[in-house]
Image (spheres, grey):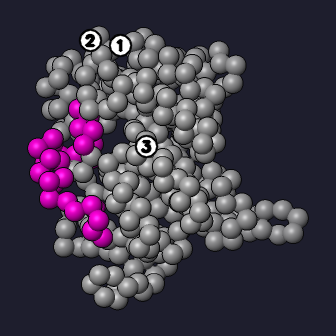
Amino acid sequence: MRWPETHIMTQNGEQQAIAPLVISASRATDIPAFHAKWFMNRLREGYCLWENPFNTKQQQYISFEKCKAFVFWSKNPSPLMPFLSEIEARGYQFYFQYTLNDYEQEGLEQRLPKVSQRLATFKKLAERIGKHRVIWRFDPIIISNTLTVDAVLKKIRRLTEAVMHCTEKFVFSYVCWYRKTEHALKNNDPSFRPPTQEEMHNLAAGIIAINAELSTSLQIAACAEAIDLEAFGIAKNRCVDDTLLLRLCPENKEILHFCGIKKTQASLLPLADTALKDTGQRALCGCVPSKDIGSYNTCMHLCAYCYANQSPKSVIRRMNTLNFMNEKL
């Protein structure tokens, strides 16, 4: 998407910048967990510098002047939570994609707080900002000799029962079997693998069955999956979600237009021929456009299945070189 352009004053003088309406913070790293102070410093300055991960010479200034909403992605948002009041006071809306898995027994998320602590944070965050702004993700779903379909569903059931009153939506994703993911997981347990199509169907059916038993059912969606699960009542997810953006910014004309809505005195009408798709993401991604401000190889969770980190060594090397008050992450 071509975002509006502006000029900003930086430590390197006046620079051209883009001014997106929606900013993701971030698909590439856990900004709330590890870079909250950097984020707040950049928010106060009004801009940050983004670097193309595939060509570090290609850089782009991102202005926050037109930003209406942030989408935070995190497994441990605790370090950012003390700053939420300031973010609100500055006029920004936001919501969280909160990944809450349970791979303690399998040792896949060894640097994360215990599940009990992450559950407590989940509940505290929902109480603070509203359950509609905390999206629960179980991502990715992995299978092994011991981590069977039934075992995964038991984990999901336990977590569902714990957070059912603290969220409105549950999103899941089956593991993407990238070469580095396969290598890292099989070093942990050679039997780790992606689920078969039959197992995907069984997992989907099991998730729907769990949801049907809840006193308060959740919206269920799958993230960027090629397999069609709509027959189970599972929608294709939009993590950067125009419906939620409209809910958060119902009177904002820029967001209404961005989401393809025209406001009249009597109603909200869809605009014609509005294609709201983030073409910078995977083909199967359903997200509406946003600008990501994160950087790969800067997440110290070091989860075994991580898509964003090249390797633990590359992360530690990168983190040792960062100055977190700088323009770029």
Foreground tag (2 vs 3)? 3
Tally of numbered tags? 3
- Amino acid type assigned to the residue bearing label 3 in the image: Pro
Q: In the picture shown, does residue 106 fall above or below 259?
A: above
Foreground tag (1 vs 3)? 3
Furthest residue in direction bottom, as rendered: 14
Sequence-first tag of 2 and 3: 3
Residue picked out by circle 2: 145
**Residue 315 inside the magenta-drawn segment:** yes
Q: Which residue is drawn at 11% across and 51% down?
A: 317
- Amino acid type assigned to the residue bearing label 1 in the image: Thr
Q: Which secondary structure dominates the residues rendered in magenta?
A: loop
Residue picked out by circle 3: 77
Q: Left or right: 13 with respect to 292?
A: left
- For the residue pair 102 and 2, the one nearer the viewer reads as 102
Residue 224: % across, % down: 44, 42
Tag 2–tag 3 contact (CB < 8 Å):
no
Tag 2–tag 1 contact (CB < 8 Å):
yes
Q: Is mark 1 on a helix, strand or loop?
A: loop
Residue 15: % across, % down: 34, 85
Marks 1 and 3 sit apart, C-alpha to C-alpha, by 29 Å
Residue picked out by circle 1: 148
Span highlighted in magenta in the image = 300-329
Q: Is mark 3 on a helix, strand or loop?
A: loop
Q: What element carries label 2?
A: loop
Q: Residues within 10 Å of mark 2 (few under 14, many from 20)?
A: few
Marks 2 and 1 sit apart, C-alpha to C-alpha, by 6 Å
